[in-house]
C-alpha cells in the first residue's frame, strides 16, 4: 500500500446486498421493490459502497443503470459470496448439516447417470439428503460449500479416477425399418455418423475393426456428448459416445448397441475431494454407493460388447 493513501473499508454488508440486487435488476426501482425499500435508499447505499471501494459501480442513465466494467467484476464476486452465505445459513438453520451431502458434478453426469439412480441411494440411506449442483466450472471443494465433486477429463494414471469410459456406437430402433433386425459395421455407410467435436474416434473404430473404405457421412457434428446421444435417440444417425452416457437409454430400449463397434477412451470421470471432507461418514457412504453403481454399469458393458478389453475399464478405489 502506498504511503499517504487512506485505506477504504466496507462498513456495512447491506450495501453489498443492495448492490447485488440492483446489479441483477439493472434498476434501483426494481431492486427497491424486491428489498422493500425506496429507490432513494437503494441509490444511497450503492453510492456509499462506491465511496468505500473507491470506484464507480454503475453508470447512471436517465431511465436505467448499467454496470461499469469494475462493477461487473464485483457483481460476480458478490453474487457468489451471498449465494454461499445463504446456503450455509439455511444449512445451519436446519441443524442437520451432517445428514446433507452436497455434490457438484457436470450437467451430463448429473442428468444421464446420477439423477436416474439417486432413488436407490435414498432407499439405502434414507437419513441422508442429497444436494446436487450441476455445473461445468472447477469448484474449490476445500473452501466452497461442497462435500465432493465429480469431474470429466483425461484420467490415464489419475489416482482419483472413478472409471475409464469406453466409446460405443448406438442407434435408434427407428433406423431398423430399412435395415433388418440390427445394424452392423457394414451399415455404417448407410447412415450419418454422429460425433462430438471431432471424427477421430470414429476413424479409430473404422481402423480398429477393419471396416472397408467407403463413403462415410460425417455431416452432423455436435459440441456436446449429451446432444450427440439425443440426436441418435431421435433417429438422426449412428452416434459414437461414451457408454456411461447411454447405458440407461439402452436399458430403456430407446437406443441399441452396435456390436463390434467400440474402442477405448482416454476420458472418464474422477473424484475431486478435500482430505478433511473425504473421511466424513456421509461422503464415504455416497462415494461407496457411486462406485457400486459404476461397477454394475461396467459389468453390463462387458456382457453387452463381449470385449475382453472392457475388463480393463474398472473402478479405481
Image: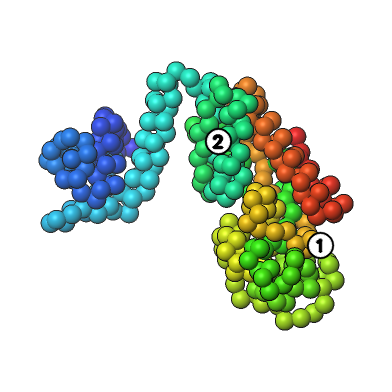
SS for tag 1? strand
Q: How dense is the environment of label 2, judged by Cα within 10 Å: few (below 14), some, or many (20 and up)?
A: many
In the image shown, does 149 or 302 lie closer to the viewer?
Answer: 302
The residue lying at 69 percent from left, 38 percent from top is 293
Q: Nearer the viewer, mark 1 or mark 2?
A: 1
Residue 8: image quadrant is top left
Q: Residue furthest bottom?
A: 215
Whether residue 228 is visible: no
Compared with 95, 122 (above or below) is below
The residue lying at 14 percent from left, 56 percent from top is 63
The residues tagged by marks 1 and 2 sit, at their Cα atoms, a distance apart of 36 Å
* x and y, in percent, of residue 138 in the image: 55, 45
Residue 222: image quadrant is bottom right
Q: Quadrant of the C terminus?
A: top right
* x and y, in percent, of residue 239 in the image: 66, 64
Q: Which of marks 1 and 2 is nearer the N terminus?
A: 2
In the image shown, does 263 or 17 lie closer to the viewer?
Answer: 263
Q: In which quarter of the image is the N terminus?
A: top left
* x and y, in percent, of residue 202 in the image: 72, 68
The residue lying at 27 percent from left, 42 percent from top is 21
Residue at image mark 2: 103
Compared with 270, 86 (above or below) is above
Q: Is residue 184 left or right of residue 88?
A: right
Q: Is residue 290 left or right of residue 131?
A: right
Residue at image mark 1: 260
* x and y, in percent, of residue 126 in the image: 57, 24
Q: How dense is the environment of label 1, judged by Cα within 10 Å: few (below 14), some, or many (20 and up)?
A: some
Amino acid at each position: 500500500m502506498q504511503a499517504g493513501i487512506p485505506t477504504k473499508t466496507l462498513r456495512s454488508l447491506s450495501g453489498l446486498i443492495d448492490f447485488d440486487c440492483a446489479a441483477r435488476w439493472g434498476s434501483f426501482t426494481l431492486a427497491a421493490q424486491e428489498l422493500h425499500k425506496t429507490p432513494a435508499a437503494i441509490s444511497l447505499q450503492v453510492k456509499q459502497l462506491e465511496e468505500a471501494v473507491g470506484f464507480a459501480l454503475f453508470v447512471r442513465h436517465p431511465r436505467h443503470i448499467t454496470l461499469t466494467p469494475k462493477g461487473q467484476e464485483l457483481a460476480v464476486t458478490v453474487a457468489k459470496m451471498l449465494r454461499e452465505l445463504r446456503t450455509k445459513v439455511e444449512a445451519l438453520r436446519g441443524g442437520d448439516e451432517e445428514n446433507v451431502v452436497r455434490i457438484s458434478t457436470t450437467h451430463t453426469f448429473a442428468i444421464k447417470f446420477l439423477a436416474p439412480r439417486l432413488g436407490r441411494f435414498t432407499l439405502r440411506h434414507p437419513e441422508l439428503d442429497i444436494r446436487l449442483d450441476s455445473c461445468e466450472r472447477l469448484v474449490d471443494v476445500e473452501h466452497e460449500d461442497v462435500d465432493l465433486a465429480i469431474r470429466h477429463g483425461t484420467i490415464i494414471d489419475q489416482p482419483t479416477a472413478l472409471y475409464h469410459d469406453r466409446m460405443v456406437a448406438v442407434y435408434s430402433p427407428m433406423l431398423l425399418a430399412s435395415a433388418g433386425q440390427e445394424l452392423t459395421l457394414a451399415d455404417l455407410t448407410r447412415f450419418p455418423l454422429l460425433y462430438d467435436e471431432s471424427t477421430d474416434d470414429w476413424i479409430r473404430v473404422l481402423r480398429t475393426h477393419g471396416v472397408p473404405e467407403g463413403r462415410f457421412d460425417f455431416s452432423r457434428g455436435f459440441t456436446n456428448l449429451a446432444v450427440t446421444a439425443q440426436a441418435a435417440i431421435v433417429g438422426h444417425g449412428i452416434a459414437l459416445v461414451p457408454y456411461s452416457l447411454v447405458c440407461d437409454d439402452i436399458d430403456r430400449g430407446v437406443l441399441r448397441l452396435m456390436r463390434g463397434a467400440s474402442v477405448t477412451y482416454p476420458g472418464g470421470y474422477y473424484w475431486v475431494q478435500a482430505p478433511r471432507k473425504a473421511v466424513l461418514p456421509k461422503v464415504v457412504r455416497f462415494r461407496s454407493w457411486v462406485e457400486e453403481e459404476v461397477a454394475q454399469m461396467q459389468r453390463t458393458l462387458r456382457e453387452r460388447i463381449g470385449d475382453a478389453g472392457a475388463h480393463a475399464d474398472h473402478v479405481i478405489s
